[in-house]
Image (cartoon, rainbow, N blue to C red):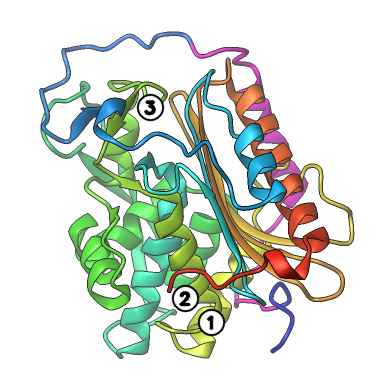
Amino acid sequence: MACLLAVSTPAQAASSASFEDAFDAVFQTKKADAPRAVAVNPPSNSNILPLSAYTAARTVYSSPFEATIALLADGSQGRIGIAAIDLNTGRSVAVLGDQPFPMASTSKVAIVATYLSLVDAGKLRLDQSFALRLPAPSRKFDGSEAPVREGASLPAYELIEAAITRSDNHATDALIAAVGGPSAVTRWVQQSTGITEFRLDRTIATLVRDDGAVNPATTIDRRDSVTPLAMVRLLSGLYRGQWLSPASRDVLLGAMSRTVTGKHRIRALLPEDVQVAHKTGTLSNTSSDIGFIRSPDGHDLAVAIYVTGQGGKAGRDARIATLAKAVYEGYLTEEPSQRRAAFR
């Protein structure tokens, strides 16, 4: 198979350093997560559940590797979910792998995959243009969907590049509208892949507008959520070309290889010669990073890390970086006798 991170699309990420510096500059000015002012009380919702509704993390592990990951994913300062799979051997590891976590912008991988599936079906084109969806003024929780206005029109391949590499919300909402709304993304994932622990309920504009109503460190909101194991299954299938054509797979993975957000997350503590293709996510009191790690000798891993709490964004980023490093080193040094097939 060709190098995972060498694929490309018609559009290339421009001025990567400046985009990423701006991204981190914005978020690092916020040293801790302060309560957000809410214009009105959030509506009650049966999708919002206490942590007690879900199984707690295991305390007995099958290997020192798993025990190390569990220790680093300690949830005393906010729950942490992680799942990873060695794409060469099928060996998996997970902590709180079956608990729902806010996807935030990691959902953009599935959104783009949904669009590309329609390209493969001949229903849409990569050169087809759609208008950016720009948020219009709106009070929190004022209606089920935040109002938007149309901006400039861009071809889909540029919208995909912006949505993945720079996490552009306006481009993402244009793609969501093009495929038929959030429910169409959920439907494609659940019906095409069989992964039912994924759901997208709101546009990005709505998600951002209503952000902060639920503390993901102490409460589970099943809307716009995924379990770490489900996300790793999605990543693994995309990597293997199960649901997209080779050309569409290369468009998605190529964009992920050019991501400029999250320099302090998965790739922060990995050796310079390790390749990373990933997608970050950030909302109130939650940070995430999902994607692929390739070692210099061609060893491929898929990983999904969802972190809440930890005192602020810097603490969450550091936890993601530490966990990614531990996963990378653990898979490369683990005894062969500990390797076992996953997802059977």
Q: Is residue 343 left or right of residue 322?
A: left
Q: Quadrant of the N terminus?
A: bottom right
| Mark 1: amino acid | Arg
x and y percentages locating residue 185 in the rendered image: 27, 63
Magenta span includes 213: no
Q: Quadrant of residue 209?
A: top left
Q: Residues within 10 Å of mark 2 (few under 14, many from 20)?
A: some
Q: Residue 237, labelled with which disc?
A: 2
303, above or below 326, in the image: below
- In percent of the image, x 38 and y 27: which residue is there? 216
- In percent of the image, x 44 and y 84: which residue is there? 242
Q: Is residue 265 left or right of residue 253?
A: right
The residue pinned by badge 1 equals 240
Q: Nearer the viewer, residue 234 or 38?
A: 234
Q: Secondary structure at mark 3?
A: loop
Q: Nearer the viewer, residue 220 or 285?
A: 220
Q: CA distance from mark 2 to mark 1?
A: 5 Å
